[in-house]
């Protein structure tokens, strides 16, 4: 059986190799696309939080101020995790084709698959939260700050803890 000298795999194995490569990297491209698409929503959301903090009723309510800080921390943390994950993948697999081997590809594939759950959960959370906010407040400056604050407490806060738990579990798994 003839073998490809660079890939060190048989000719018959090349279609499966390319299919696996395509599946993995298409999913990462999709994650990157989703993340890039969220940027304007995140910016608008953060501007609404900053604006809300200056409202006299919100300034005087410690619970809402704490909620705003927590939400801001969650959004920043999740965004940083996704961005960092995508950068880690890029640096890990950037030169894969220079000296491609089945072993290198399998290691890269395993590395990327390890990020799937975390990236997927984080992107899902960000997408759901940012879309809900954008749908409810297409022009956040055109509605009341207290209405946004109520939405933050009732709709934005729930669920962030679950994503943080997934990130924490993933971090422990990838270390060990």
Image: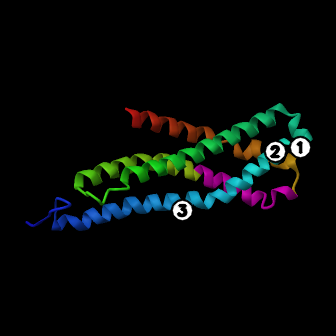
Q: Residue at x 36, y 53 (%)?
A: 93
Q: Position of residue 17 (x, y in %)?
A: 26, 62
Residue at image mark 3: 33
Q: Earlier in the sequence, mark 2 or mark 1?
A: 1
Question: Which range of residues does the magenta coloring cover?
Answer: 125-142
Out of 13 and 96, give the one closest to the viewer: 96
Few, some or many residues within 10 Å of mark 2 (<14, 14–19, 20+): many
Q: Is residue 57 left or right of residue 176?
A: right
Lower position in the chain sequence, tag 3 or tag 2: 3
Of labels 1 and 3, earlier in sequence is 3
Residue where numbered disc 1 is placed = 55
**Residue 141 is covered by the magenta coloring:** yes
Q: Main secondary structure of the magenta part?
A: helix
Do we see residue 122 in this rendering?
Answer: yes
Please provide percent x and percent y for residue 176: 37, 32
Q: Is residue 141 above or below residue 80?
A: below
Q: Which residue is mark 2?
A: 149
Q: Secondary structure at mark 2?
A: helix
* Mark toward the viewer: 2 or 1: 1
Q: How many C-alpha atoms fall within 10 Å of the one at disc 1: few (<14), some, or many (≥20)?
A: few
The CA span between labels 1 and 3 is 35 Å
**Vertical position of residue 19 compared to residue 78: above or below:** below
**Residue 159 seen in the current view:** no
Label 2 – label 1 distance at C-alpha: 10 Å
The local secondary structure at tag 1 comes to: loop
Q: Which mark is residue 24?
A: none
- Find residue 46 and report its horizontal and vertical position in percent: 73, 49
Give left or right: position of 142 versus 108: right
Distance, label 3 to label 2, CA atoms, is: 30 Å
| Whether label 2 touches label 1, CB < 8 Å | yes
Q: What is the quadrant of the N terminus in the image?
A: bottom left
């Amino acid at each position: 059986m003839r073998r490809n000298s660079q890939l060190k795999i048989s000719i018959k194995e090349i279609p499966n190799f390319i299919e696996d490569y395509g599946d993995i990297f298409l999913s990462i491209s999709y994650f990157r696309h989703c993340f890039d698409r969220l940027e304007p929503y995140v910016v608008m959301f953060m501007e609404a939080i900053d604006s809300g903090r200056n409202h006299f009723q919100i300034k005087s309510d410690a619970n809402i101020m704490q909620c705003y800080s927590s939400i801001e921390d969650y959004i920043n943390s999740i965004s940083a995790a996704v961005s960092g994950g995508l950068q880690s993948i890029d640096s890990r697999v950037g030169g894969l084709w220079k000296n491609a081997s089945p072993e290198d590809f399998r290691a890269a594939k395993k590395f990327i698959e390890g990020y799937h759950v975390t990236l997927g959960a984080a992107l899902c959370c960000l997408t759901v939260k940012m879309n809900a906010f954008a749908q409810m407040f297409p022009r956040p400056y055109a509605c009341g700050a207290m209405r946004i604050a109520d939405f933050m407490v009732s709709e934005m806060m729930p669920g962030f803890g679950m994503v943080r738990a997934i990130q924490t579990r993933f971090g422990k798994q990838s270390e060990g």
